[in-house]
Amino acid sequence: MLPVYPMAQTFFITTAIDYTNAAPHIGHAYEKILTDVVARYHRLKGEPVFFLTGVDQHGQKVQQTAQKQGMEPAAFARDITAKFLALWEKLGLSNDGWAATTDPLHKAVVSKILQQLFDAGEIYKASYSGFYSVRQEQFLTDKERGPDGEFGPEWGEVTDISEENYYFRLAKHRDWLLSYIDAHPGYVTPAFRQTELRNAVEKLSGDLCISRPKARLEWGIELPFDAGYVTYVWFDALVNYISFGGYWSGETPHNPAFDERWPALHVIGKDIMAPAHGVYWPIILHAAGFTDAEIPPLLVHGYINIGGAKMSKSLGNIVDPAVLAEKYGPGALRYYLMREAVTGQDMEFSEERLVVRYNSDLANDLGNLLNRTLNMAKRYRASVLKRVDPADPWLAEARAVAEQYAARMDQFQVHAALEAAFGLAAKCNAYIEAQAPWKLAKDPALADQLDGVLYRLAEALRILSILISPVLPDAARGMAAQLNVTAEPCLAGALNAEAALADGHTLGAPTPLFPRIETEPKA
Ligand code: ME8
């Protein structure tokens, strides 16, 4: 009998692995930041988290770009990989694993799965003649023709080829996938994408070519049962989620380390849901013996567009996230993308909006609030607080904001969660104006009232330092240090009255946390 392991003790979250045929762009950065924020939020909840991201180093695109530059694909992929790694470090990603598909560990798992599927009769050899898109690395049928009968520009150069290849029996599992989708309404987030996926599955016909003859493509993982071929890049890439998740890391494919994590939540862009992540991947897993409970859910995000257009090199509208992070700081970029992008929908990128968001929300609302509060506490009370009963309605409302924030984060609605948090900052600023502590300080009869105001503000700031921590980890640490809060941030610390600042707590010294970005005047 197979051992039974407890399922998924760990929150396992992955991003798509990015092609190393070109430098990282703002869309890549958005996806990694979104995933990082969700991972950090789950750590804040006290859950064990495994966050995996990486690079997709094989395939025709990489081989072609390398060739054009007169480089070996391996050297070329290594150079581009270094750019991704440097960017992720700069943006403060907290990934626990790194999935680079040239890693021998990964190649071994791809080989094992291919052999297993081949032995089980799920992979067969057949010959094909027809059209092939070099850009999309896929065979084309009449379905891919436009209304004018031609293959559209999205397919790039289309060539006529005839060759023998290996095929994975995709069509045979179509009905299983349809019934799986119907039985699992939460499989894809947002729900409209699940409907879109179901429609794509209904149209599914034919099997998936999973090999490329070495004569045409050398830069890939050799098939274990035929040295004349390499593995199709998508088959190779999708397997990263399990190979770097611990599958086959022991004597058996399933093992405690893997089962403790799997299934992962896959965070991907809308372009790679159907067919790659929503058709090929669940069917590969199902054919390899994964149960329905082990099919990984999908979180599908929208596109970051520039000038209303999809980014492309030829349009010259690539915004370099490394340049933005250097110019404005990683926090400004992280905050802007998380505050303005609605998870699941497209967003128009604007550098101007980034600056406006930073200055209005971070420098003005939150930064000034912290600064004013600490300064007033220092001036009027030598930075020492007098505790207010945590059942106080004002404080209860602040904790209710934390609850609303958590409910939204649980739904991946990061922008809405931030909206709630910054609503609390606005409430504090309005409270300062209404209470005018500088007036209270002049009247000894109002000393208790002044103590209450200062305590409530400090306590709201402590809660805010926790709520912003997944998006702005550095600033959150800075806030906590200024508030003289030493406890590791945790969500319970924002939700529970017991975690409130102690009577006699001494606040730290104020230093500006978010210096304003002074933009150059427009010509
Ligand atoms: O698709 N806005 O790699 P990739 C938001 N290697 N997200 C975007 C985007 C944009 N403008 N452009 C791309 C691949 N993305 C494969 C994945 S996974 C086993 C293999 C997202 O570098 C895209 O949707 O083209 C995908 O999720 C990720 O960036 C990597 O895209």
Image (tube, rainbow, N blue to C red):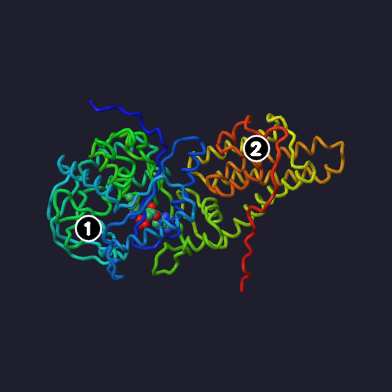
Where residue 439 sits, quadrant-wise, is: top right
Q: Which residue is mark 1?
A: 139
In front of the other: 223 or 314: 223
Q: Quadrant of ligand 1?
A: bottom left
Check mark 2 vs ligand 1: CB closer than 8 Å? yes or no.
no
Q: Secondary structure at mark 1?
A: strand
Residue at x 49% of width, y 54% of height: 91
- On screen, residue 428 versus residue 22, left or right, reads right
230 up-or-down from 64: above or below: above
State which quarter of the image contains the N terminus.
Answer: top left
Position of 506 relative to 317 (above/below): above
The mark that comes first in sequence, 1 or 2, is 1
Residue of label 2: 398
Residue 143, percent from left and from top: 25, 56
User: On the rendered structure, is 460 left or right of 233?
Assistant: right
Residue 189 circle label: none
- Image location (x, y in percent) of residue 184: 36, 36
